[in-house]
Each structure stands twice: as structure tokens, then as C-alpha cells.
């Protein structure tokens, strides 16, 4: 049998809903009636006049275009964001100088080559490369190897020796050492200067030696390598940051690395892993190119584009797939967002029921629809005590508790004292309050909503993450709070609240016997003087506020009640 049939009473509907009529729902979603008092008198007269004739219902704008509507945050200047690649020079480039020896290295004057030959011709010597790029091999004469890599040097030396000694000769070569170079690093870097390295060191090595690129003024996309006033390489570090590829010019002594001034930029924020300023090559780029640069979080569905054009400021809101074809220009701000709401919600059921514990429901599903589909044990379920836990309610309870505790601290911890005796009393109260506030802040609100009352269930709309509790019929009572022996006791008809408290050892000396709460199975909290006990109830004895300050005692009592309702815990002062 399902929950609603067990109740055998009509539902109390607390929110308007048309569950069976899609047409009626559509009308309700598009029209809202306002009280006449909200409309100024002059406009009321105009509306009455229009009602007697034809009303111009032509919309002033297409409000669904994405061009109009509220924009929550002011646009940000790209200069206020760190540049993309700002953390590039926090690594270890400067501490990893290479030896310049690899298969692609090209020999230049000053290098040294080891040549060994045995057999018909015996030779073992380290030969320097002279200013003309030659090495001298006895019996063969000078051999030009400038610009050759290690494999080409080996082939050249082997041919030179075997041309003189064609038979029974073995040859071995090794590029033993390279000439160090000094490279100038200038432009928009932190510490321009002249830095030592090897010809095959990376451009990043020399930039890191100079302290990296100036984050405010330097360009990550226009870096030139000059040799004899001629540009031999242009490097875009975005290629390295995104794809791991970078130009590898072989440096020569006296080369100059020039970091150009930063080009036009745009600001990118929102649902991205890191908000950055992105530098443009030229004055614009496409949306697809920007998506390739920015690292979006999962679920991004829309993009807000703000900036200035010749016709004036713009603010346009696009679905992500439409943004690919848009043009972004210098100074624009682009905000990515996961702004597409799911059409389904997931709620959880706990307690006494049959079937699964989680349900995927339409976004407009109501509690009655779900309960009507849940089967429960007929003689074991307290359907009149159903309750619901909601994250938004938990957050509201937490915020309300925090506001009350902050007001308590502000009011009583900063109050002045007129006498020494009063100061001592206030110091004791301050210590008491601080300890109480610290313990109260550690408590977790339940977020429980009372949806079942007087045999009826409120037909509220469900939200994602709701937990519906369908409790079992209970035969016990829980006695807690300021009693000597907190315990559970069997419910006995005819026993009152004091009887149950006496069975738990009676009140403690800190108890406030004028303030006893009854917590129902459905989450409702009531004063013990006004209710009849039922199986499953909890008797919660509140602590008394240990102060002679009547105003402070009243405030503390109010907060104790608030904490007890939100957390079902009596906090002892």
C-alpha cells in the first residue's frame, strides 16, 4: 500500500500547481497577477483606459535573445588579471643548463672533436675547430666541418682518412665539447642582461635567467632572437604552454633575445580552471580559438561576452556552440558559465518503505507524486510523521544561527563596564559566551522541514538533493538534554513529561525545568506544556542560562531554543 492511501485524508496543498494540464501550466508560467497597490495610481488609470480598447502587447525587445537582461558583476579590466603563462618561470629552467651535445647540434668554431683511427693508420687526438671551421688531419689536410651535426662530422672524417688509407682502417669520432656562449636578454623582462649558456640551451633557460617576462608589460607571444641585427627566430610561448612545442634556435655568442611589448588582451573568467588575461595576435580572435586556449570546467554551457564596439558597449549571452563563431576583440571580457539547468532532480528516501532509495524525477515534481509511487509496510510505517531534509533549509538554519551567535558576541563582548565588580562579572560572562559560541558553531543543522501536520502532508515541490524520511512506528520515547541519565524508554499511555524525566533520574542542577521541548517524529518542536505525548517523541530538557543579567539570560535562552530546533541538540552552557 502506498503512503497517501494510508493517510486516508485530503492533502493540504500549500503551493499552486496544475499537475494534469500542460496548457494551464504554460499560462501560469507566463503570467503573474500583481495587486493594484503595486501599480502607481497614474499607471492604473492608463491600464483601465487600455482595458476598454485594444492593448498594445507587442514586446519592446526580444528578452530571450541574450542581449538584454541583468548582469550581476561589473566588467573587469584585462590588466587586473594575471597573464596566461604567469607561472611559467616559477619552475627550474635556470638550474638545468645543458651541455649542448645532441644529435642535432651543429659544429661551430671553438668546438673540439676527438678523432681516433687504428689499423693501417694510427691516430688519436682532440682536434679544435679553427676560425675557418676546419680541423686538420695529418696526411689528409684541413677538413671543413662547420655547420655539420655529429653524424655528418663522422662521415666527413671517415671519408677524408679512407681516401688516403683505403684499406684496413677503422675510424671513430666524438664531439667532445662545445664553445659556451653569452646571450643578451632584453626588452620587457624582469632583469635584462647578458647571460651565459650553451648554444643548444632553450630560449626558456635564458628568459628564466633574466627573471622571466614582465607580467604587466611583456609579451608571451612575440619573442625574437636577433643575430647581427637580423631576426633568426620568432617564438610564441602559447604554443609551448598548450601543445608543448617551442622553436629551438641554436644560439651563438652575442645573440640577443628581445621580449616585445604586450599586445592587445582580453579577460577570461567564470567557470574556468584559472582566470587569466589572454594576449591576442592581432586585434581579434574567434570564439573557437579562445575555447582552445582557455581550460573550461565541465558543464559549461553559456558564454557572456562584454566589450565595446564602434556602435557602443555590448553585452551578449550565447550558448557555447553559438559562441564558437563570434569575434572577440581587444579589451573584451568573456565569462564562461554552467548555466543550463537539468530537467531532472534526484531525491532520496529513507526509513520504512519498499523499493529503491533514490529517484530521478522531473524538475517540477511534487511530494504527493513521489509518495503515491512508494510502497510501505502497512502496519509498520508512521506515515503521519513524514519529514523532509533540504540543503537550502540547512544553509538558512546555519546562517541564522551564525547571525544570532555573532550578535551575541558583538553585544556582550564589547559592552563597557562601569565598576571593577561589573568588569569581573562581564569577564566571567564573556568566557562563558565564547565557550558556548565555539561549541554551537560546531553543530550541524538538520535542514528538516515539517511537511506532515495534523494528519495532512503539504504538497510541496521537491528540490534536487531532498531526503524524504518515512519513519517506522515507534514504541519508545527518548529523554535527553539536562537529565541525569539520558535514555530511551518504552512509551506508556498515561505517563506525562515529568514521569519520563523522573525515570531518567530527574533534572540536573543546570536544567531549566520551565523550558522542556518535545521533538516529534516529523521534526516539529513544541513546548511540553501544550502537547500530548505520542510514541516516537523526544523529551528535550533545555539548560538554564547561568547568568543574573536578565537581558543576557533572555538572549541566551532564545539562542538555545534556536539551536535546539535546528540541530535537535540541547547545548549546555
Image: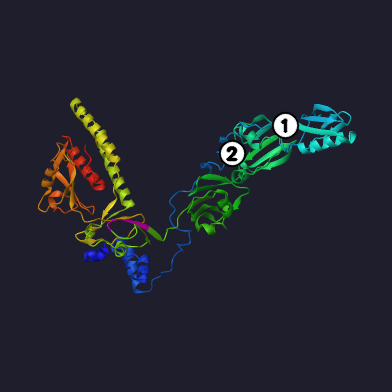
Residue at image mark 2: 217
Quadrant of the image occupied by residue 469: bottom left
User: Considering only vertical position in the picture, is 566 above or below 167?
Assistant: below
Disc assigned to residue 52: none
User: Considering only vertical position in the picture, is 257 above or below 297?
Assistant: above
User: Considering only vertical position in the picture, is 38 above or below 191?
Assistant: below
On screen, residue 261 versus residue 363, left or right, reads right
Q: How far is mark 2 from mark 1, CA to CA? A: 25 Å
- Asked whether residue 480 appears in the rendered view, the answer is no
Highlighted magenta segment, given as a residue range: 346-352
Marks 2, 1: nearer the viewer: 1
Q: Earlier in the sequence, mark 2 or mark 1?
A: 2
Identified at 55% across, 52% down, the residue is 291
Q: State the quadrant of the C terminus.
A: top left
Identified at 57% across, 53% down, the residue is 328
Measuring from the top left, give residue 55's x and y in whole percent: 38, 71
Residue at image mark 1: 254
Q: State the quadrant of the N terminus.
A: bottom left
On screen, residue 333 versus residue 262, left or right, reads left
Measuring from the top left, give residue 403's x and y in whole percent: 29, 43
Q: Residue furthest bottom?
A: 53
- Assess whether mark 1 and mark 2 are in contact (beta carbons under 8 angstroms): no
On screen, residue 20 versus residue 185, left or right, reads left
Q: Is residue 350 magenta?
A: yes
Amino acid at each position: 500500500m502506498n503512503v497517501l492511501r494510508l493517510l486516508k485524508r485530503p492533502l493540504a496543498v500549500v503551493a499552486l500547481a496544475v499537475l494534469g494540464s500542460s496548457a494551464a501550466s504554460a499560462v501560469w508560467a507566463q503570467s503573474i497577477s500583481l495587486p493594484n497597490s503595486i501599480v502607481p495610481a497614474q499607471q492604473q488609470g492608463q491600464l483601465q483606459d487600455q482595458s476598454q480598447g485594444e492593448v498594445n502587447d507587442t514586446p519592446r525587445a526580444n528578452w530571450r535573445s541574450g542581449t538584454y537582461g541583468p548582469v550581476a558583476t561589473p566588467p573587469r579590466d584585462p590588466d587586473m588579471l594575471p597573464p596566461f603563462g604567469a607561472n611559467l618561470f616559477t619552475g627550474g629552467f635556470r638550474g638545468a643548463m645543458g651541455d649542448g651535445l645532441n644529435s642535432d647540434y651543429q659544429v661551430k668554431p671553438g668546438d673540439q672533436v676527438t678523432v681516433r683511427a687504428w689499423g693501417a693508420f694510427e691516430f688519436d687526438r682532440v682536434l679544435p675547430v679553427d676560425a675557418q671551421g676546419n680541423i686538420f688531419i695529418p696526411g689528409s689536410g684541413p677538413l671543413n666541418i662547420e655547420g655539420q651535426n655529429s653524424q655528418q662530422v663522422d662521415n666527413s672524417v671517415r671519408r677524408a682518412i679512407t681516401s688516403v688509407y683505403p684499406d684496413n682502417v677503422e675510424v671513430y669520432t666524438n664531439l667532445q665539447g662545445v664553445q659556451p656562449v653569452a646571450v643578451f636578454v632584453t626588452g620587457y623582462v624582469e632583469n635584462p642582461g647578458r647571460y651565459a649558456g650553451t648554444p643548444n640551451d632553450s630560449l626558456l633557460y635564458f628568459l628564466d635567467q633574466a627573471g622571466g617576462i614582465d607580467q604587466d608589460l611583456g609579451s608571451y607571444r612575440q619573442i625574437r632572437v636577433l643575430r647581427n641585427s637580423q631576426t633568426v627566430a620568432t617564438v610564441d610561448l602559447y604554443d609551448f604552454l598548450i601543445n608543448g612545442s617551442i622553436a629551438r634556435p641554436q644560439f651563438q655568442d652575442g645573440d640577443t633575445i628581445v621580449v616585445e611589448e604586450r599586445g592587445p588582451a582580453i579577460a577570461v573568467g567564470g567557470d574556468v580552471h584559472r582566470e587569466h588575461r589572454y594576449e591576442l595576435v592581432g586585434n581579434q580572435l574567434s570564439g573557437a580559438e579562445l575555447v582552445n586556449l582557455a581550460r573550461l570546467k565541465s558543464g559549461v554551457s553559456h558564454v557572456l561576452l562584454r566589450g565595446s564596439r564602434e556602435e557602443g558597449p555590448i553585452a551578449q549571452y550565447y550558448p557555447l556552440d553559438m559562441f564558437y563563431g563570434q569575434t572577440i576583440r581587444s579589451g573584451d571580457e568573456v565569462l564562461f558559465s554552467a548555466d543550463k539547468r537539468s530537467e531532472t532532480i534526484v531525491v532520496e528516501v529513507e526509513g520504512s518503505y519498499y523499493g529503491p532509495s533514490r529517484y530521478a524525477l522531473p524538475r517540477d515534481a511534487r511530494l504527493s507524486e513521489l509518495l503515491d509511487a512508494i510502497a510501505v509496510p502497512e502496519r509498520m510505517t508512521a506515515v503521519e510523521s513524514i519529514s523532509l531534509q533540504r540543503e537550502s533549509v540547512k544553509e538558512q538554519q546555519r546562517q541564522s544561527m551564525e547571525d544570532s551567535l555573532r550578535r551575541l558576541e558583538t553585544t556582550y563582548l564589547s559592552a563597557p563596564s562601569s565598576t571593577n565588580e561589573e568588569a569581573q562579572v562581564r569577564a566571567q560572562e564573556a568566557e562563558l559566551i565564547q565557550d558556548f559560541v565555539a561549541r554551537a558553531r560546531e553543530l550541524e543543522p538538520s535542514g528538516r522541514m515539517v511537511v506532515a501536520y495534523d494528519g495532512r502532508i503539504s504538497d510541496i515541490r521537491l528540490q534536487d538533493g531532498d531526503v524524504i524520511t518515512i519513519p517506522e512506528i515507534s514504541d519508545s520515547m527518548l529523554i535527553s538534554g539536562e537529565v541525569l541519565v539520558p535514555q530511551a524508554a518504552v512509551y506508556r499511555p498515561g505517563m506525562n513529561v515529568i514521569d519520563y524525566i523522573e525515570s531518567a533520574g530527574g533534572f540536573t542542577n543546570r536544567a531549566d525545568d520551565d523550558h522542556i521541548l518535545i521533538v516529534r517524529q516529523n521534526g516539529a518542536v513544541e513546548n511540553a506544556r501544550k502537547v500530548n505525548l505520542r510514541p516516537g517523541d523526544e523529551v528535550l530538557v533545555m539548560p538554564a542560562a547561568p547568568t543574573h543579567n536578565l537581558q543576557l539570560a533572555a538572549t541566551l535562552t532564545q539562542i538555545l531554543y534556536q539551536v535546539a530546533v535546528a540541530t535537535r541538540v540541547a547545548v549546555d552552557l
